[in-house]
Image: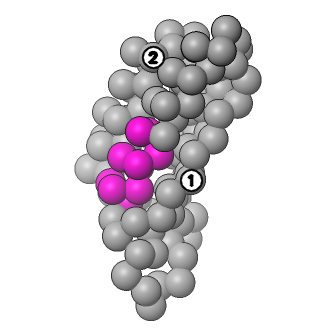
């Protein structure tokens, strides 16, 4: 599984990248055929509290592309919420088949 992390207009710390990799690796438990995961991080409206946006696009051959995007106080929290949303999408698409 190929994980790509894009941080827009800032440099993500190694600690943040390790956190993201650890979280998205868990998605493979729900579907072992996941080819690629693309994580995009960006800061929106810096003057507000809820200004960290994480978007995760996941590619699995049997299910196509799945996508989740969340905004939170921290990137870790936003990534957590995205991973939870993708888990639900993977479970739902598994039931549909």
Residue placed under numbered mark 1 in the picture? 69
**Circle 2 SS class:** loop
Q: Can residue 53 be seen from the camera position used here?
A: yes
Relative vertical location of residue 64 with respect to residue 18 in this rendering, above or below: above
Residue 27 in the image, given as x and y percentages of width and height: 43, 25
Relative vertical location of residue 25 with respect to residue 38 in this rendering, above or below: above
Most extreme residue toward the front, as rendered? 96
Could you tell me how far apart the alpha carbons at marks 2 and 1 are, in whole angstroms?
Answer: 19 Å
Residues marked 2 and 1 touching at CB (< 8 Å): no
Left or right: 27 in relation to 95: left
Residue 60 in the image, given as x and y percentages of width and height: 64, 19
Q: Quadrant of residue 35?
A: top right
The stretch drawn in magenta includes residue 82: yes
What residue sits 41% from the left and 39% below the top? 84
Most extreme residue toward the bottom, as rendered? 47
- For label 2, count other residues whose C-alpha is less than 10 Å away and answer few (under 14), some (14-19) or many (20+): some
Residue placed under numbered mark 2 in the picture? 30
Residue 37 in the image, given as x and y percentages of width and height: 56, 32
Q: Which residues are magenta?
A: 75-84
- For label 1, count other residues whose C-alpha is less than 10 Å away and answer few (under 14), some (14-19) or many (20+): some
Residue 70 in the image, given as x and y percentages of width and height: 50, 57
What residue sits 41% from the left and 75% below the top? 50
Q: Quadrant of the C terminus?
A: top right
Q: Nearer the viewer, residue 36 or 92?
A: 92
Left or right: 71 in relation to 89: left
Relative vertical location of residue 25 with respect to residue 76 in this rendering, above or below: above
What residue sits 57% from the left and 46% below the top? 68
**Circle 1 SS class:** strand
Q: Which of disc 1 and disc 2 is earlier in sequence?
A: 2
The image's colour scheme reads: one colour
Q: Quadrant of residue 62?
A: top right
């Amino acid at each position: 599984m190929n994980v790509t992390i894009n941080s827009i207009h800032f440099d993500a710390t190694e600690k943040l990248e390790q956190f993201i990799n650890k979280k998205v690796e868990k998605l493979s438990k729900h579907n072992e055929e996941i080819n690629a995961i693309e994580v995009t991080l960006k800061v929106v409206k810096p003057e507000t509290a809820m200004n960290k946006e994480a978007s995760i696009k996941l590619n699995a051959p049997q299910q196509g592309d799945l996508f989740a995007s969340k905004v939170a106080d921290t990137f870790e929290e936003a990534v957590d919420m995205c991973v939870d949303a993708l888990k639900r999408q993977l479970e739902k698409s598994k039931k549909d088949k």
